[in-house]
Image: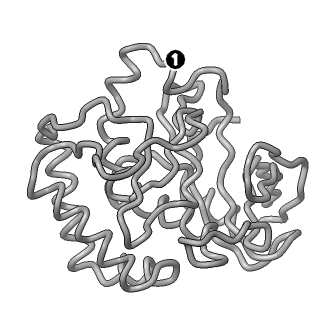
Amino acid sequence: MSNRLDKNTLLTALQQGKLALQGQFLQGSNYTFLGKIEYHDLQLPVVYKPTRGEQPLWDFPTGTLAKREVVAYLVSEALGWDLVPPTTYRQEGPLGPGSVQQYIEHNAAYHYFNFEEADKQRLRPVMLFDFIANNADRKGSHVFVDADNHLWLIDHGLCFHSEDKLRSVIWDFAGQSIPAQLREELSRFLLLLEKDAGLNQELRRFLNSNEIQALISRTRKLVSSGCFPTPPTDRRVYPWPPV
C-alpha cells in the first residue's frame, strides 16, 4: 500500500474506522500495538498507543503521552514539513482512548546511524523540529525513509514539555545558520502560533497553557537567532538507548 494517500481520507479513517489489534511492539516502556483500520474499502496498518498503557513518569503529566503524538503531527503540518505520519487521538479503541498513527512501511535496518551522507543532509528540518518539539527522546531508529524515499519521524510521546528536555542523537548542524527557506517557514509557523485561533484551539486540546507558551518561545528563539541549536553543557543531551 502506498504511504501517500489523501490526508483527509487518512485522518477520517484513523478516527472513524474499525480498529483491530494485530500484534504488540515489545521494545518500549509503554504499550504499543500494530493494528489494522478498516474504513469502507480502505485497509490501513496503524500504530495504536492506548493511554492506559503508558508508564507513569516523574516529569510528564500522567496520561498525556498519546496526546503529544498528535501534537507532533499538528506541528509538522503547520510547518509544512510533512515529517510525521497522520496521527489522531480517538476516544474508542480496543484498550480505550489513545493515539492512532498510520504505520509507515520501511527498512528498519536503515536509520540515522547508517544513513548515507545524502540522507543525513536532509536532516536540517528534523533538528529544528526536535528543538521546537522539545523532543526528549530522538533515537536514531525514529528517523527513516519509506519506499518512496520520503523522510519520516515517529515516537513523539516525550515532547512539548514546558521545561528544556531536548535529548537527541542528531546534532549534525549545531551552530550553523538556518537556511533561508527553513527560517521563512519557521517565521510563518510562529505567526500561526501567535495569531491562528484554529491552531491554538487544536493545541489546547492536548497541551496546557504553559506548554503552548514554551512552544512559542522555542520557535521565537530559533527565528531570532537564525542558527541551529547547540547541545547544552549542563545536562545529558543524548537519549538512551541511542537507537
Q: Residue 6 in the image: x percent, y percent?
A: 55, 51
Residue drawn at 73 percent across, 72 percent down: 51
Q: Residue at x 28, y 46 (%)?
A: 233
Q: Position of residue 114 (x, y in %)?
A: 52, 17
Q: Give the percent coordinates (x, y) of residue 84.
A: 50, 49
Looking at the picture, does residue 111 appear above or below residue 224? above
Q: Quadrant of the rendered structure where residue 109 is? A: top right
Label 1: which residue? 114
- In the rendered image, residue 74, in percent from the top left (x then y), is placed at 45, 64
The residue sitting at 54% across, 71% down in the picture is 59
Which quadrant is the C terminus positioned in?
top right
Q: Give the camera-side residue of 47 and 66.
A: 66
Vertical relation: 153 (above or below) 117: below
In this picture, is 70 found above or below 236? below
**Above/below status of 67 relative to 73:** below
Q: Colour scheme of this structure image?
A: one colour
195 relative position to 202: left or right: left
The kind of secondary structure element at disc 1 is: helix
The residue closer to the viewer here, 51 or 40, is 51
Say which amino acid is labelled 1: Asn
Which of 54 and 234 lies nearest the eye of the viewer? 234
